[in-house]
Image (cartoon, rainbow, N blue to C red):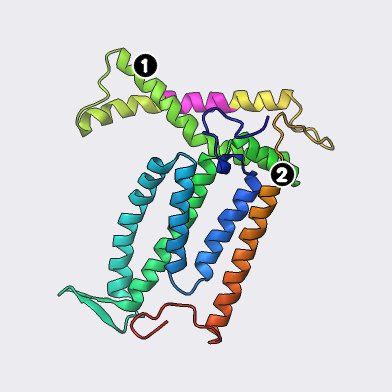
Amino acid sequence: MSGSASAAIPDSPLARMHPIAKIVGICSLGLSTIAWPDFTLGLLFILVLFLAAATAHEFKPFAKIMLGFGIPVTIMLLFIQGCYSPKNTKTILDLDFARMGLEGSLYAAKIVVTLMVFLGSFYLTTKTTYMGRLVAALSQVGVPSKVGYLILASLNVVPQMQRRITVIEQSQHSRGLETSGNIISRARAFIPLLGPVVLSSLTDSQERGMTLETRGFGIKGIRQTSYIKVQWRRTDTLFTACATLLFLLVLAGSIMSGMGIVPLGIQWGGRA
């Protein structure tokens, strides 16, 4: 089984990429954003992630989650760090009850873009990677099968719960239970929903454990085979090399900038 390995994942260059190469990309982008002196490189990475989401046919949900997370977090951190950071020495905005400082605002912007780079890259990885391919790729690099199963189960627990809740809600609605309306009506419908969801989840976990046991999942000294075959391509090698080189260059530039050899950070109010 090759390609995206799932009909639910649209075919794209990002979906065909090896999962390990995507993990390297997440680490490279996130760590490079942290190492860079200011938030400008993170903004560039966010733009690249939006372009990658467009090529992967995930632009609308990607934009929704990025804006839904980025806007409130930005407002909150700008208010906290910008107004009350002890690093503030230069005022950029007087709010009467508080003064927003330059240094705290820049620090807040750095935190926001770092979080959004990690969030965006991880979101695209999960949305363009069939979880079976991820586990098979981890097994190829020597990760124990039990660890791979734990990762697969952890990533699938939320989608499975959402599907189960949807089915139970539809079943309750077909039996005349009101599941919409005001907050009180929704709360009344949500409480009876908890029992079937929890019980079905426990039953599903027990059945899955029994299935794994009957198939010899816990046998020691035996390497389990995988139905899904994940191929490492030249494009994966090129992407991994470029991502690693990018991080090394950013790290070297940040160190030289900190030592005053090469000024990389944009001058903000006379300070880098």
Q: Report x, y in % for residue 4.
A: 60, 34
- What amino acid is found at the position of numbered circle 1 in the picture? Ser
Q: Is residue 122 left or right of residue 187?
A: right
Instruction: Specify few, some or many for label 2: CA neighbours under 10 Å numbering under 14, 14-19, or 20 or more.
Output: some
Instruction: Specify few, some or many for label 1: CA neighbours under 10 Å numbering under 14, 14-19, or 20 or more.
Output: few
The region drawn magenta spans 196-205
Residue 163 seen in the figure: yes
Q: Tag 2's secondary structure?
A: loop
Query: Residue at image x 51%, y 29%?
Result: 8
Screen quadrant of the C terminus: bottom left
Viewer-closest of 81 and 52: 52
Query: Residue at image x 67%, y 58%?
Result: 241
Q: Report x, y in % for residue 181.
A: 20, 28
The image shows a total of numbered marks equal to 2
Mark 2 or 1, closer to the camera: 2
Viewer-closest of 223 and 107: 107
Query: Which residue position is annotated with label 2?
Result: 232
Residue 173's quadrant in the figure? top left
Residue 17, label in figure: none
Query: Which residue position is annotated with label 1?
Result: 171
- Name the residue furthest left: 96
Screen quadrant of the N terminus: top right
Residue 114 seen in the figure: no
Q: Tag 1's secondary structure?
A: helix
Q: Is residue 188 magenta?
A: no
Query: Residue at image x 74%, y 47%?
Result: 141
Q: Report x, y in % for residue 85.
A: 33, 75
Q: Earlier in the sequence, mark 2 or mark 1?
A: 1
Residue 108's quadrant in the figure? bottom left
